Amino acid sequence: MTEPGPRNSSVSRDEAMAVAEAARESEWEHPSFAAELFMGRFRPDLIFPYPLQNDADKKIGDEFLGRLELFLREHLDPDEVDRTHEIPVETIKGLAELGCFAMKIPKSYGGLGLSQVNYNRAVALVASYCGSTAVWLSAHQSIGVPQPLKLFGTEAQKKKYFPLFAKGFISAFALTEPDVGSDPARMATTATPNEDKSEWTINGDKLWCTNGPVADLIAVMARTPDRIVGGKARRQITAFIVERDRPGIEVIHRCEFMGLNGIQNGLLRFTNVKVPAENILWEEGKGLKLALVTLNTGRLTLPAACVGMAKQCLHWVREWSNERVQWGAPIGRHESIAQKIGWMASTTFAMEAVTYYASALADRGDADIRLEAALAKMFCSEAAWRIADETVQIRGGRGYETSRSLRARGEKAIPAERALRDARINTIIEGSSEIMRLFIAREAVDPHMRLAGDIFKPGVSLSEKFRMAGRAARFYTTWYPALWVHTAWPPKYMATAGPLAKHLRFAHRQTRKLARTIFHAMARFGPSLEKHQAVLNRIVDIGSELFAISAAVSYARAMVEKNPKDKTPIDLADLFCRQSRRRVRALGCAIWCHDDARTYRLARNVLDGKMAWLEAGAIGETP
Ligand SMILES: Cc1cc2nc3c(=O)[nH]c(=O)nc-3n(C[C@H](O)[C@H](O)[C@H](O)COP(=O)(O)OP(=O)(O)OC[C@H]3O[C@@H](n4cnc5c(N)ncnc54)[C@H](O)[C@@H]3O)c2cc1C
């Protein structure tokens, strides 16, 4: 039910969609568990056996993490970072000497050459201790210059820049602008070529650029001259590697936030900044696609950081819930708190399962993880926020008190409130939860759009419509009835999942139901389905739960196979699945039974000021 943006918008909704569609990866070269799931095909073979880290890679990671942990404990005080809004220069130097700014740089270029799994483990470790430091590292490596350079750089670019990161050079990624957030079509920063296109001149402002104020190299997205496609001008966005010492780059403002006080994040201004053509990443006009492809794996670091934070919260909560006695018993024995602890532990387990499943696949390179990474990002960032919130609740008044204040009066300095503040950003950056749901929904309906979507498009000839309708009819007459055939009866999946088989059977059945629901929603709403975001959100959330159930079961089985004496992973997965199944059922009911239209109408009335009287009594605008 989304409607076109404000009248003064210089880019129409259709233009914005066209830019996003042009940047979208439309092909699926490799299989994807999640993509299959949305098509009603439950494929345990794509998620079993769980891709546990092999011993050799684990050893490399363990050794590096050991050194990193020692360094952090000795040289970084996260409370001081939070208080002073600075990470000491010496600490950054020490991290660079450890190779932290070259974790993902191949060894042949002087980097550590860590796998995605080890890199994510390292960021998770840092995030469990100091969110700001984790963001320094991940903004640099997950979205900054190293990742797109690795994927799309020329050999000359790699030779020039990779070794610099091994020396501690820091990078940033500049896409967002004051008027450009989730919708890059409105990009105002321009890059204009000289006559022979050997040099480009960048002008514009980039907002919230993490590491921007201190970066040596910045990946800058800028609008380049339109290209004519089918007689129409198509907006082009191109990515450039910009060296920070080029004349014309200014830090206009260092931004401050509710959390992550130690990050260096700023509003940067580019005024006639000259960049040689050899600094174009990939190709002219490929900037947005580059950003999206980079984020496919880059995005995995964020859920890993959430896992690190969730583990830390669990640790604080376990200690406190045993230690704190109220009403004659440790608070962890009171049912309300015990329920929270059970949920936190089982959810942390599922977060770890989805994150490291997708990370291992990124290392293997034989699967398409764009949906899995997006699902992991969405699921983990939302869960981590709730986990941090429950941690504050369980710590009671101490949860709201700063660790500095706790320490000053002789208590253990547990920074639960800092964790809550730091966790909040994760549902906004690197694709907000709303945009992640739209992205996943777009991919979920894509196979149907390919088959039948163009039938409704204006300008498609009648004969073409008939051809498409024939093709769609042939597909749906076999695909749709098959979705009603119930094959997931006991003892199916006993050999694969043992005591957790029932959860896999549930996921199998619900996968088919989910695909039917998508089909019914398309039949009911037609092309306007994309505007029914609330319906699509529920579809995506069901898919997310089914993915998490499958990953958690697979992870638990692999862990128990490795260490048969410890059955606790089964308990964690079992509880997660039970809770998740309840959520799936509720979401399923709400697909067709909801107040969406009423809520939308009411929101419109609120926006039109018809209920402004409700705001009376509040001061309103701050001066
Ligand atoms: C601490 C921090 C660090 C950051 N680091 C970087 C960085 O290093 N580089 C960089 O380029 N950017 C960075 N950003 C920017 C960040 O990526 C953006 O904040 C994010 O993309 C969202 O954009 P926006 O804030 O302009 O929100 P908007 O796009 O204005 O959206 C506002 C709200 O509307 C929702 N929304 C928007 N469009 C739709 C839609 N079509 N349907 C439904 N809901 C919608 C959004 O989800 C959000 O809830 C950072 C931001 C912060 C706060």
Image (cartoon, rainbow, N blue to C red):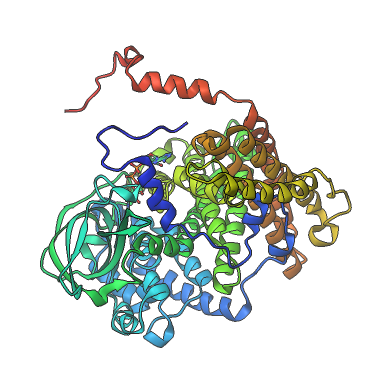
Q: Which is more toward the observer, 221 or 375?
A: 221
Residue 225 lies, in percent from the top left, at 24, 60
Q: Which is more toward the observer, 128 or 595?
A: 595
Q: On the rendered structure, is 300 left or right of 186?
A: right
Q: Can residue 473 be seen in the rendering of this structure?
A: yes
Residue 32 lies, in percent from the top left, at 62, 61
The quarter of the picture where the C terminus appears is top left
Q: Name the outermost residue toward the right.
A: 491
Question: What residue is shown at x 49% (from left), y 23% (from top)?
Answer: 599
Q: Quadrant of residue 95?
A: bottom left
Q: Quadrant of residue 584?
A: top right
Q: Can residue 322 be seen in the rendering of this structure?
A: no
Residue 277 lies, in percent from the top left, at 23, 74
Q: Which is more toward the observer, 158 or 467?
A: 467
Image mark count = 0
Question: What residue is shown at x 53% (from left), y 59% (from top)?
Answer: 370
Residue 601 lies, in percent from the top left, at 45, 20
Question: What residue is shown at x 73% (from left), y 46% (from top)?
Answer: 512
